[in-house]
Image: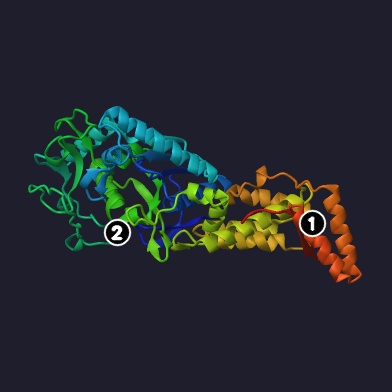
Amino acid sequence: MNKIYLYNTLTRQKEEFKPIKPKKLSLYTCGPTVYNYAHIGNLRTYIFEDFLKRTFLYLGYKVKQIENITDVGHLVSDADSGEDKMMKALERENLKPAVSSLMKLADKYTKAFIADTKALNILQPDKYTPATKYIKEMIALIKKIEENGYAYQTDLAVYFDVNKFKDYGLLSGQKLEDKIIAARDGVVEDPDKKHPADFALWFKLAGVNKNHIMHWPSPWGEGFPGWHIECSAMSIKYLSDHFDIHCGGIDHIPVHHTNELAQNRAGTGHQVVNVWSHGEFLTVDSNRMGKSAGNFITLQTLLDKDFNPLAYRYLALQTHYRQKLNFSWDSLTAAQNALYNLYDLFASWKKPISGDYNRYRQEFIKAISDDLNMPKALAVVWNLVKDQALDSGVKKKALLDFDQVLGLGLNKLKKIKIPIKIKKLAENRLDAKNKKDWPLADKLRNEIESAGYLVEDTADGYLLKNKRKS
């Protein structure tokens, strides 16, 4: 059985993955707060998580994946300050302040997010869990945390008492005394909070939150859950109180996942997650992409510029998930050109046949098993493509095999149908080249391109491809 090595944020090292149950992976991935469209920086994280899931499936694991949908409780600051992001979105979209409006908004952006993930060929989780449907589970977990002595009440909220949890900051590596909570203009702080890092488990309908539309009864009064408790409650419900991997973006480490880890242990009395795995930022001009930064590019923006969504997936393959990926239109164009070149070569080959590509398969497995080294796996693919000693049918079978992990949609490609007239022009051009009649060869190339095709010279003749925008 192949060993898989993953970097664990908790231990700050790459370590051999040891499943809780043999050949089974329990996986929780932090989903979107559905108050706006996802940008491609957000989507890079979901692509990385898809590579992880596909790798385990490829290596024979049965995977159970749960992904939340946050439709209440996520305030503008991840550290429980400001307005609820969903409430703020109502104002942006001129919707009346009502539960029906919030649910309409959540449904709109949930559908948009799922459509984006499908366009990127991301495998869907076993279950999406909208936060508003699991209030009962959140209340039950908060009660356990309170009973175990880790929570306290004020007039505004029920807070987690970070001073009671000695391992707070274990995930981020940040000491509690060094933790800084950013001050924000217009935010009403709770004067009864014991420590600035204490975070809300439950917000009461009081103070700045007195007009919150979404609220439920609880032992602490009418109110709504904090963002962090949602993921703890829903992951434990479906994956049990001990599961394998929890994923998210690197921005989740200092606050959201740090708070989740604290809640998990305070509520259960033991470690819940074995491996914490995080994807790095997508940057634009070396700045993190984000809605607040104003440099946010959606998948629809790529489509409007005639890019294939899978060109972005290919771009993500070229950089390790734990390294920053700097986005530019030039880099996306290059990725699309490389992807289309792969498509055209693949489509030009004969039907897949059995054959020996084990050397490449072992190199591929070694790459993906080494902390999801997708750039190296991609290099293995291109080495195989360029291997002239390997039958094209064997190459096609190998790429279909590898694409179970890469997810570039090779199984959906159809053989290129080149008109007989175009093939004849290509044959005549090859003949002209062999006779060194360069003017005629150039003329025939221009005729082929004018008809919407490209001809490329190869070691054994030529390759015809559909002409595409890039």
Asked whether residue 190 is in view, the answer is yes
Quarter assignment of residue 127: top left
Give coordinates of residue 306: x percent, y percent: 57, 51
Mark 1 to mark 2 CA distance (whole Å): 58 Å
Q: Nearer the viewer, residue 467 or 83?
A: 467
The reply, left or right, for residue 239 in relation to residue 162 is: right
Which residue shows up at 34% across the image and 57% down it? 293
Quarter assignment of residue 460: bottom right
Among the two numbered marks 1 and 2 on one chain, the one whose residue lies closer to the N terminus: 2
Give coordinates of residue 152: x percent, y percent: 12, 42
Residue 172, which numbered label? 2
Quarter assignment of residue 440: bottom right
Which residue shows up at 57% across the image and 63% down it? 376
Kind of residue at badge 1: Ile
Note whether 425 is above or below 134 in the view shown. Answer: below
Query: Dot 1: what SS?
Result: helix
Residue 448, which numbered label? 1
